[in-house]
Amino acid sequence: MKKIFLSFAIISILSLFSENIFSQKNKFEFLPDGINFLPLRANMQEAKLGILYYPGNANLKVDIGNSMDLFAIHFPDDKSKLTFGVEFMAYASVIGYQQLRLQIDAIDGFFGGSAAYSKLMNDNLFQIRFRIIHNSAHLVDGNWWATEHPRTWRKPGGPIPFTRDFGELIFANNQEFLNSNFRYYLGGAYAVLVRPKEIKRFSALTGLEIHSEKLLPKLLSKPTNIFFAYHLNVAGYPKYTGTNQIQLGIKFGEWQTKGVAFYTSYFSGNNMISEYYNERVNQFGIGFRVDFP
């Protein structure tokens, strides 16, 4: 059943573009510049490189990863393209415990691939992204103590064999309004494999991003983007609830290209560290991120 679902999803998406993909008028590009569908800024399950500091408990969330487009197909109208890429990423919870600093408490790992389609229609850029992602979670050295034998886990009950293999489909629209750029999106995901079994297979997501480079002066000839991002994920862990994240910050550099961002963040919902998925948390953070799409 799982293989049937994945095959149906992939075939359905490719069939939307099959007539155009195999046309000889299309331009094929290997290793295109940039990335077709920029990662959702306030979604925790996107490839990032940076650090988020939580003043409330002095813990850190460390992101390591990136997404990359490997192939691009440019259609003859010069307004649409289809790309295929890969994603490898992880984020870790870094804690201080028993006078030991910077202990890796737990980690979530992700890898998979994606297909993204973009089409410019009048002043709007319409986009679709389909991802297939494997997500697993683990307790690490901050939880395993070499004291008196037997060793014990700091987390009650020990590690959870957490796994979630899912397909995700997102529709997004980009447009300009009042000297700002808006991207709003809506999507859903279905997991073909979940552990523990109490986790629901379906989830939904939506969000909004706003950025403008016209409100602040340039820095060393590079634009300064002020931005706001909001992301809502509705998932069953095990009951369906909403998880929210808000970001407000500044990025130095072009929005679509490499740059450095500083931001504040507020997170409310099920713990983003999957080994603690059934905990509800509220966290304020201060973050730093490097973009190199």
Image (spheres, rainbow, N blue to C red):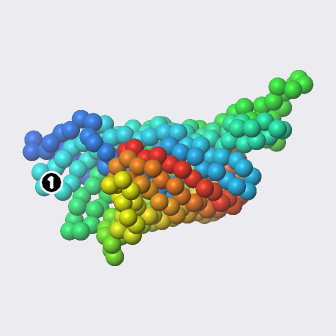
- Which residue in the protein does label 1 denote? 78
Give the class, few, some or many, for how many residues have Cα within 10 Å of label 1's Cα (few <14, many ≥20).
few
Secondary structure type for disc 1: loop
Describe residue 119's horizontal placement relative to residue 235 as left or right.
left
Q: Position of residue 284 (x, y in %)?
A: 65, 60
Describe residue 130's horizontal placement relative to residue 159 as left or right.
left
Residue at the (43%, 47%) spot, across then down:
291
Q: Is residue 29 above or below residue 203?
A: above
Q: Position of residue 139 (x, y in %)?
A: 70, 36
Q: Is residue 122 above or below residue 139?
A: below
Q: Residue furthest bottom?
A: 178
Asked if one can make out residue 198 in the rendered structure from this viewpoint, the answer is no
- Front residue of 214/209: it is 214
Residue at the (90%, 25%) spot, across then down:
148
- Front residue of 248/194: it is 248
Q: Residue furthest right?
A: 148
Asked if one can make out residue 150 in the rendered structure from this viewpoint, the answer is yes
Describe residue 232's horizontal placement relative to residue 279 as left or right.
left
Q: Position of residue 177 (x, y in %)?
A: 33, 74
Q: Residue furthest front?
A: 220
**Could you say which quadrant of the image residue 217 lies in?**
bottom left
Q: Position of residue 154 (x, y in %)?
A: 81, 38
Q: Is residue 221 above or below residue 30?
A: below
Q: Which quadrant of the figure contains the C terminus?
A: top left
Residue at the (72%, 42%) spot, across then down:
95
Residue at the (48%, 53%) spot, across then down:
261
Describe residue 153's horizontal placement relative to residue 80 as left or right.
right
Amino acid at pointer 1: Asp
